[in-house]
Image (tube, helix red, strand yellow):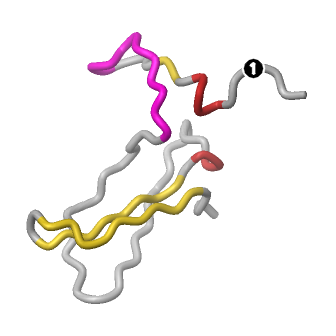
Amino acid sequence: MRQGKPAACRGAEVKAGENEGATLRHDYVVREWLGPIEVPGKLEKTVALQADWKAGDLGVAAFVQDGPTLLQATALAGCIR
């Protein structure tokens, strides 16, 4: 039997920045924001992972806008190879 709460429920104590000392209990935290990017057709992007990021916990979220109008949004967990 597993001990304690699931990782998503435990949260993470913030060590620096505007939320220093707080415990975040969010599902996801933005590590890098890319955009806006104009996409004429196909888009492929490589992102360098920082040494302290847990690759198994990373994923990608993307959305498409036309001005202020949200057209599509999607997310993919565990897409790191």
What residue is rendered at 31% in x and 65% in y? 63
Q: Examine the residues drawn in magenta and state their main secondary structure.
A: loop
Identify the secondary structure beneath mark 1.
loop
Q: Position of residue 11 (x, y in %)?
A: 54, 24
Chain part drawn in magenta? 17-27
Q: Position of residue 44 (x, y in %)?
A: 40, 77
Q: Quadrant of the C terminus?
A: bottom right
What residue is rendered at 69% in x and 23% in y? 5
Q: Quadrant of residue 24?
A: top left
Crowd rating for badge 1 (residues with CA inside 10 Å; few <14, some 14–19, many 20+): few
Query: Which residue extends farthest right?
Result: 1
Question: Left or right of 31: which side holds 80?
Answer: right
Residue position marked by numbered label 1 in the rendering: 4
Q: Position of residue 77 (x, y in %)?
A: 56, 57
Q: In the rendered view, would you say 62 is above or below 71?
A: above
Q: Position of residue 71 (x, y in %)?
A: 24, 72
